[in-house]
């Protein structure tokens, strides 16, 4: 069991939740087709989201100065972001200090699979097992003279722990698929089955039209029908941050979709 602690600065509050798998654009796909992609679902829910405390609009003039980013809070509110670094960067100051277990960093990025027009999130890795410093969440405007908007409660940051040095222990190799006959055999079965299935989708009343999509990967089945011996996940169920005292982070719950 590992820990992820969020120490909130006195006088501030933070809204943080397990990232839900739902996305508006996925809901809008035909028959919610996008949710059939299990790797996409897992990535959506792979971590926690920080939510915008108040709504605001922002625009970048295209110049380098930090003043070139103009932020307009909604009436009666304070904007949680500003132009701080220049060159079209919009900066959120995260009002808490995160702590991970020894040897773990925090991967900090934008909301995963939530595209936003005219602005893109930047990513960072922070050594949160020792650092007494807070960090910022930054977004880069991709087009000048275009007004963007963050709504209250909209995710602006996505984060999750990663083991430091894990990538450096990986030994990458390239080989021919034919050198792994068992894997090659399963791949050929899958490829042939997919071609047949896609062809049958064009025939009204076929088994393929009844099934609508092949569920082998979703169910953890190899093309030959055997269950994979590897650990298979079809859903992530992350825990909420629990409030330890009045100054701590507020718990924000989210109901996962049933798809």
Image: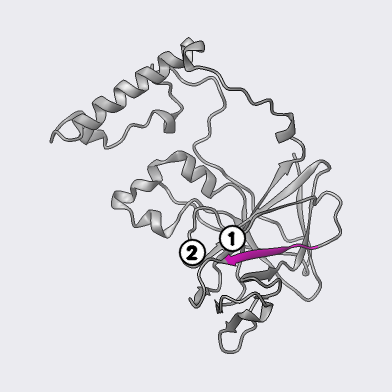
Seen at 56% across and 75% down, the residue is 62
In terms of depth relative to the viewer, which is nearer, 165 or 12?
Answer: 165
Bounds of the magenta segment: 134-140
Q: Quadrant of residue 196?
A: top left
In terms of depth relative to the viewer, which is nearer, 226 or 169?
Answer: 169
User: On the rendered image, what quadrant is the N terminus found in?
Assistant: top right
How many C-alpha atoms fall within 10 Å of the one at disc 1: few (<14), some, or many (≥20)? many
Q: Is 200 left, or right, of 99 in this rendering?
A: left
**Among the two numbered marks 1 and 2 on one chain, the one whose residue lies closer to the N terminus:** 2
Q: Residue 230 colored magenta? A: no
How many C-alpha atoms fall within 10 Å of the one at disc 2: few (<14), some, or many (≥20)? few
Is residue 89 shown above or below 100? below
In terms of depth relative to the viewer, which is nearer, 83 or 27?
Answer: 83
Is residue 138 shown above or below 176? below
User: Given contact means CB atoms under 8 Å apart, are the residues at marks 1 and 2 in contact?
Assistant: yes
- Checking the image for residue 189, the label placed there is none
Q: Is 100 left, or right, of 38 in this rendering?
A: right
Give the residue at mark 1: 121
């Amino acid at each position: 069991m590992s820990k992820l602690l969020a120490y909130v600065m006195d006088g501030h509050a933070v809204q943080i939740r397990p990232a839900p798998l739902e996305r508006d654009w996925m809901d809008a796909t035909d028959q919610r087709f996008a949710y059939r992609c299990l790797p996409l679902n897992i990535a959506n829910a792979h971590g926690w989201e920080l939510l915008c405390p108040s709504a605001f609009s922002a625009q970048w003039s295209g110049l380098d100065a930090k003043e070139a980013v103009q932020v307009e809070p909604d009436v009666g509110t304070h904007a949680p972001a500003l132009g701080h670094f220049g060159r079209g960067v919009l900066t959120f100051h995260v009002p808490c200090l995160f702590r991970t277990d020894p040897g773990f960093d925090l991967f900090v990025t934008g909301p995963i699979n939530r595209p936003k027009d005219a602005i893109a999130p930047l990513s960072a890795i922070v050594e949160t097992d020792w650092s007494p410093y807070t960090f910022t969440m930054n977004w880069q405007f991709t087009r000048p003279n275009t007004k963007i908007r963050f709504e209250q409660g909209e995710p602006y940051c996505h984060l999750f722990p990663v083991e430091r040095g894990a990538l450096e222990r990986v030994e990458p190799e390239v080989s021919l698929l034919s050198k792994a006959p068992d894997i090659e055999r399963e791949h050929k079965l899958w490829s042939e089955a997919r071609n047949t299935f896609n062809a049958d989708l064009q025939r009204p009343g076929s088994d393929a039209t009844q099934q609508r999509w092949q569920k082998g990967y979703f169910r953890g089945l190899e093309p030959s029908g055997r269950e994979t011996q590897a650990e298979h996940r079809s859903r992530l169920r992350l825990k909420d941050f629990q409030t330890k005292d009045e100054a701590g982070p507020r718990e924000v719950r989210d109901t996962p979709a049933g798809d």
